[in-house]
Amino acid sequence: MSDVARIWEQIRLECQTTLTVITPREIVPEAEMVLMKHGCVVTLHETCSVVKFPEGTIRKEILPRMPQSERYKLVLPDGYAVQETWVRHLGQSVLYYTLD
């Protein structure tokens, strides 16, 4: 089982109520600090990173949907917003953030 598949299985088994996103590579330290400042938990793995957003985060799809990906706006409880692009063939997301 790949690292990403194992992580998704672990997340599914935990039955979390919080939004969790897996990114295809290590998150840059600056982004990690910004996300953690807003209540996210970032876990680095060998082939990916897992970002758990705080409870109360709202995920809204940005239309139109693209054939190879889906885009979402994530609004954290403190009002900070992040954009997520979920890439189907990877089964993972890319996060776009802004500095405070």
Image (spheres, helix red, strand yellow):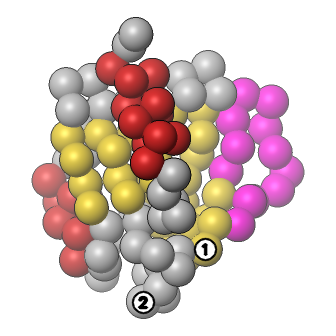
Disc 1 designates what residue? 58
Total tally of numbered discs in the picture:
2
Q: Position of residue 96 (x, y in %)?
A: 44, 56
Which quadrant does the C terminus fall into?
bottom left
Q: Position of residue 59 (x, y in %)?
A: 63, 66
Query: Does residue 93 appear in this view?
Result: no
- The residue depicted at 23 percent of the width and 69 percent of the height is 36
Residue numbers of the magenta segment: 60-71
Residue 23 appears left or right of 84: left
Q: Give above or below for 80 relative to 18.
A: below
Disc 2 designates what residue? 78
State how far apart marks 1 and 2 are (Cα).
11 Å
Quadrant of the image occupied by residue 24? top left
Residue 26 appears left or right of 92: left
Q: Position of residue 71 (x, y in %)?
A: 67, 50
- The residue depicted at 47 percent of the width and 85 percent of the height is 77
Q: Is residue 65 magenta?
A: yes
Q: Amino acid at mark 1?
A: Ile
Q: Residues within 10 Å of mark 2 (few under 14, many from 20)?
A: few
Query: Does residue 59 appear in this view?
Result: yes
In the displayed image of the protein, which residue is found farthest to the bottom? 78
- The residue depicted at 43 percent of the width and 48 percent of the height is 14
Which quadrant does the N terminus fall into?
top left
Q: Position of residue 90 (x, y in %)?
A: 54, 23
